[in-house]
Image (tube, rainbow, N blue to C red):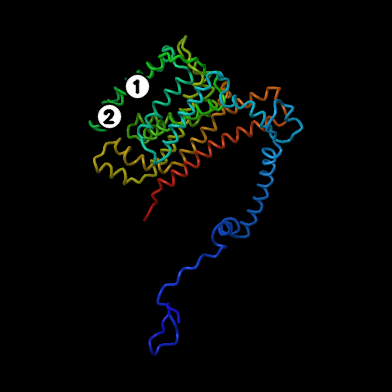
Amino acid sequence: MSDTQKPLAAGSSPAWVRSQMAEPLPAPLSDVGAIGWARKSLFSSIPHTILTLVGAYIAYLIIWPLIKFAILDAVWTGEDREACLGHHGACWAYVKAYFSQFIYGRYPDASRWRVDLVFFLLAAGLIPLLIPSAPYKRANTLFMLVGFPLAAFILLTGGNVDPGAFAWITLVIIGLIIAGLILLPVFAGRSGIKDVQPALIALGLGLLVPAAVLVILTIDFGLRPVETSRWGGLLVTLVIAITGIAASLPFGVALALGRRSAMPIVRLVSVVFIEFWRGVPLITVLFMSSVVLPLFMPEGVTVDKLFRVLVGVTLFASAYMAEVVRGGLQAIPKGQYEGADALGLTFWQKMGLIVLPQALKLVIPGIVNTFIGLFKDTTLVLIVGLFDLLGQIQSSFTDPTWSTPTQGHTGYLFAAITFWIFCFGMSRYSIFMEKRLDTGHKR
C-alpha cells in the first residue's frame, strides 16, 4: 500500500482513496506549444484547414519570388548598370550608389554632418521618451518639445533668419493673443475665476516664447545657409511626418474639446474647421498651400514652400485626430464627468486629470493609425515639387548610369522596406502601450 492511500473504515466497501492530492499531469503535446496553436488557430475545422492551405499556397507564390528577387538573384556590388544587366534580381548596387541622396537629397556634402546630428538628437531624445521606466521624463519631454525643434531648425537651415520673413507669423500670434484677451472675460464668466490665472499665464507664454524663439533664430551661428529646396529624401519625409504628428495631436485634442463645448461659437468654429478639412483631399490641400496661399500674401512677403506644406499637413491631420479623440471622449461614462463636477474640479482639471487620460488610452489604436497614415501620405508632397524619399527614388530613374530593367523595382522595394520599418515600429509600440495601460473592465 502506498503512502498516499489508506484503507476505508471497517464495514465499508473494499476500496482505496487518496489522502493527498495527485500531482497535475502535463497537458498533451497536441494542445500546447506550436502544435497546439496550429490546431486551434489554423486547423480547428475543415473550412479553416482549407483556408490555411490556400493561404499558404498564395504566400508561397508571393514570398518565394520576392526572396529570389531581393536576395538570391540580387546584385550587391557594381560601379554602373553593366553590373546589373542580364540579372533578374534586385540591383542593390544602384541603391548603394544613391543611398546618400535617398537620405539627404541635394543637401550639401560638407554640411551633411548637421543632418546626422539632427538624427542623433532625435534618437537620443525620442528613445528615452518612449521607454516608460526611463528617468527624467519631464526634462526629456521639455527637450523634445522646445529644445530639439529649435536645434533642428538651426542646424538644418543654418539659422540667422531674416526677421522680415516671419513678420506675418508674428502678426498671426498677436492676433491670437488679442482674440484670447477678448474672449477671456467670457471664459472667466462661464468657467469660474479660478481659470483666469492659468489663462493669463498661457497668454503670457504665447507672447514671450515666440519672441524669444525669434531672437534666437536671428543669431548668426556661423553655419552655411541651406535652402529647403535642396532638402530631400528621408530627411524631408521625417521632417513632414514628425512635425505633423507632433502638432496634430494637441490641435486635435483642442478641436475635439471644442466640438463638445457648451459654448455655441467655440463648437461652431470647431465643427466647421473639422468638417472642412475632412472633406478636402490632402492633395488639394497641398496644391492650395503651394499655389493659392501665396496669392493672399502681401506684396514682397514670401513663405517657404516646405513651411506651407507643413502647415497644410498639420491642419489636415488635426481634423482627423479630432474625430479620433472625440470618439474617446464619447466612450467615457457620464458618471466620470459628474464625479469630477461633484468634486468641484474646474473644466481643465476635469479634462486633464480624469477625462482625457481615460479617453486617450481608449483610442491609442486610432491615434497611431492616424500617425501611420500621415507618415505614408508624406509621399504626396512630390506634386508640389518637394522630393521626399519616394520622390528622390523616382528622380534617380532618369540617370542613365544605372538604367536597367530592374532599377524601378529595386527602388520601390527599398522605399517599401523603409516605410514598413517605420510604420511597423509605430504599430508595435502602440500595441505595447495599449497592453501596458490596459486596466481591464471587471464587473
Q: Which is more N-terminal, label 1 or label 2?
A: 2
Going by the picture, which residue comes out furthest to the left? 193
Q: Residue at x 56, y 19 (%)?
A: 109
For label 2, the residue is 198
Q: Secondary structure at mark 2?
A: helix
Q: Would residue 288 appear left or right of 50 to someone viewing this image?
A: left
Going by the picture, which residue comes out furthest to the right? 86
The disc label shown at residue 209, or none: 1
Q: Amino acid at mark 2?
A: Pro
**Residue 207, x across and y down, in percent:** 33, 20
**Residue 383, relative to residue 439: is it above or below?**
above
Can residue 171 be seen in this snapshot? Answer: no
Of residues 335 and 145, the one nearer the viewer is 145
Q: Distance between the Cα atoms at labels 2 and 1?
A: 16 Å
Of residues 165 and 216, the one nearer the viewer is 216
Q: Residue at x 43, y 25 (%)?
A: 149
Q: Amino acid at mark 1?
A: Val
Quadrant of image for the N terminus: bottom left
